[in-house]
Amino acid sequence: MAAGAARASGVREVPQGRREVWRALAVLEPYCAVCDVSYVVHGTGLGTTFVCVPGRLDGSPDPGAPRGEIVVWKPGHRVDTRLDLPTEAWTTRIELADTDSGGTRVTMTLALEPREANRLVQRLQRRTRQRLVQRTLDAELEKVPAHVDLAASAG
């Protein structure tokens, strides 16, 4: 990991089966009401590219909108995405496993890698980035049940 990079992992269990959870967390819909984010998706599976914008998208996304790609795609088991921003790149890994009770264990790992070339600046900001990544991870894990419920209600 680069000098200023930060990473955090966590787990959330839900009672729904892996198939339902996969559909809720790995399949990008045009709009996610849980996150209030719109996606413009090109492709399916590995290599899929997307643009994401806050809120509902009316028209085309701004040329400077964050762009991402699915970099690992193992249906029902794991999906990794990379989101490129001007100053940093975020990688999200979602891994699914069955629980003994028939539910799903969601393991999520977030990584933030700054694009700042100055190593001293990277080192000075690392602790702040680590707190940001941990807070973001905690918030994303908290939303997992809402994502699953939304996907189930959509059919």
Image (cartoon, rainbow, N blue to C red):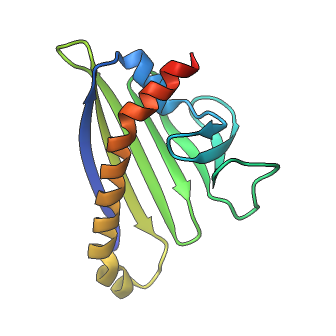
Point out the image quarter for the N terminus: bottom left
Name the residue nearer the viewer: 5 or 53.
Answer: 53
Residue positioned most to the right: 59
In the image: residue 108, left or right of residue 57? left
Residue 151 lies, with reference to residue 41, above or below; the image says above
Residue 143, percent from left and from top? 38, 41
Quadrant for residue 97, please give it.
top left
In the image, residue 29 lies at what x, y percent?
62, 33
Whether residue 48 is visible here, answered yes or no, is: no
Tell me the quarter of the image containing the C terminus. top right
Q: Please, is residue 44 above or below residue 125 in the view?
A: above
Q: Nearer the viewer, residue 69 or 31?
A: 31
- Is residue 34 among the parts visible in the rendering? yes
**Which residue corresponds to the image point at 32% horizontal and 46% vertical from the top-left?**
109
Residue ID at (47%, 81%): 117
Image point (58%, 45%), residue name: 69
Q: Quadrant of residue 108?
A: top left
36 left or right of 17 in image: right
Please tell me in which quadrant of the rendered image residue 129 appears. Answer: bottom left
Residue drawn at (27%, 54%) of the image: 8
Residue 40 placed where, x, y %? 70, 43
